[in-house]
């Protein structure tokens, strides 16, 4: 099958690899990461995929799912790689052969890997638009129509988020940062990072949720929310055998999340 031509507009797909440490030499997962080696999991068939696959494998699945649904032209695929992440040489070569390009990014807020996604606004200024996807999703339908829209941020819908209500975001407009279309802009980066830092201090930064910050900052007039049908989230805890426990923890910690993610409501202050 012949390859599609390169897109004439400077647009790209981006995923972020900054928050998960690689497995130790003995195959066990370091504390703080959800990934484990298949050979050391006795019953991995009962686990959600994101707990079985290594980060590089997830990214490869994402990249291949994108290539399968492309219809008009071929876009660059960027991996925003944390400067602290050690990638085995064979995995780096595997992703490069598949068409991935690495861009290094230092930690933005220490201990808050979700914030590293914000570097896209600054480090990828040579692109007019970037479609940012979490590495643990699969794309189910063409995404070409998401490019070229006038909104500053186009974001996938979050069907059950509560925290964004603090900013007056109605349920049907609440977003999830697993998929965002944004326009790289150094000025927007500086303003938004300053916004987050003014409202979250010290330990509160550890509770930072990228979709809450984005929706509260950009608000309803500068965003567009998409339906859920574009993606399959292989890391969604609701798909795992621990669904009841996950729901209980979510309800138990909801008050803490609301307190610590409080951004004082205003969308641009």
Image (cartoon, rainbow, N blue to C red):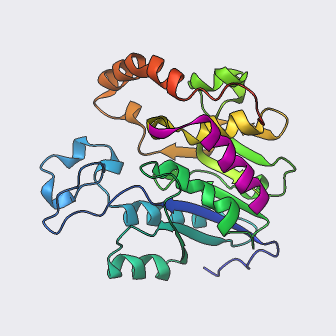
The residue lying at 62 percent from left, 54 percent from top is 118
Instruction: Give the image quarter of residue 154.
Output: top right
Give the residue displayed 32% in from the left and 43% down from the top. Answer: 48
Residue at x 21%, y 59% (from the top left corner):
37
Residue 249's place in the image compared with 10, above or below, is above
The answer to which of 81 and 266 lies nearer the viewer is 266
Residue 229 visible in image: no
Q: Nearer the viewer, residue 163 or 236?
A: 163
Q: Is residue 93 visible?
A: yes
Picture coordinates of residue 61, whole percent (x, y): 45, 62
Please state, as top left, top right, bottom left or bottom right, where the C terminus lies in the image.
top right
Is 33 positioned to the left or the right of 42 in the image? right
Q: Which residue of the protein is positioned furthest toward the right in this rendering?
A: 150
Left or right: residue 191 compared with residue 208: right
Label the magenta part by its dominant secondary structure: helix
Q: Quadrant of the N terminus?
A: bottom right
Instruction: Give the residues drawn in magenta, as a range.
Output: 184-202
Does 173 appear in magenta? no
Q: Nearer the viewer, residue 26 or 219?
A: 219
Q: Position of residue 8 (x, y in %)?
A: 82, 76
The residue closer to the viewer here, 176 or 1, is 176
**Is residue 86 found left or right of 226 in the rendered image?**
left
- The percent coordinates of residue 122 (x first, y second) are 69, 64
On the image, the x and y values in percent for residue 179 come to 62, 48
Residue that appears at 43% across and 37% down: 203
Q: Quadrant of residue 229?
A: top right
Determine if the magenta segment contains residue 188: yes
């Amino acid at each position: 099958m012949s390859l599609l031509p390169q897109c004439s507009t400077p647009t790209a797909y981006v995923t972020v690899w900054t928050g998960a440490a690689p497995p130790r030499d003995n195959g066990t997962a370091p504390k703080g990461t959800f990934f484990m080696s298949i050979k050391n999991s006795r019953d991995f068939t009962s686990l959600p995929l994101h707990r079985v696959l290594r980060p590089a494998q997830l990214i490869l699945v994402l990249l291949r799912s994108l290539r399968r649904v492309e219809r008009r032209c071929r876009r660059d695929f960027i991996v925003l790689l944390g400067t602290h992440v050690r990638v085995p040489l064979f995995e780096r070569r595997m992703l490069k052969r598949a068409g991935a390009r690495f861009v290094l990014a230092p930690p933005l807020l220490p201990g808050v890997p979700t914030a590293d996604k914000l570097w896209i606004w600054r480090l990828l200024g040579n692109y007019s638009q970037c479609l940012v996807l979490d590495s643990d999703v699969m794309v189910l339908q063409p995404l070409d129509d998401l490019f070229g829209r006038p909104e500053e941020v186009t974001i996938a819908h979050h069907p059950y988020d509560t925290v964004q209500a603090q900013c007056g975001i109605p349920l049907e407009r609440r977003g999830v940062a697993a998929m965002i279309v944004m326009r790289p802009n150094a000025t927007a980066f500086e303003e938004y990072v300053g916004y987050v830092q003014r409202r979250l201090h010290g330990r509160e930064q550890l509770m930072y949720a990228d979709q809450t910050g984005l929706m509260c900052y950009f608000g309803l007039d500068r965003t567009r929310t998409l339906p859920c049908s574009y993606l399959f989230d292989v890391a969604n805890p609701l798909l795992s055998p621990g669904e009841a426990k996950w729901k209980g923890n979510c309800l138990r910690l909801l008050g803490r999340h609301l307190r610590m993610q409080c951004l004082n409501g205003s969308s641009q202050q």
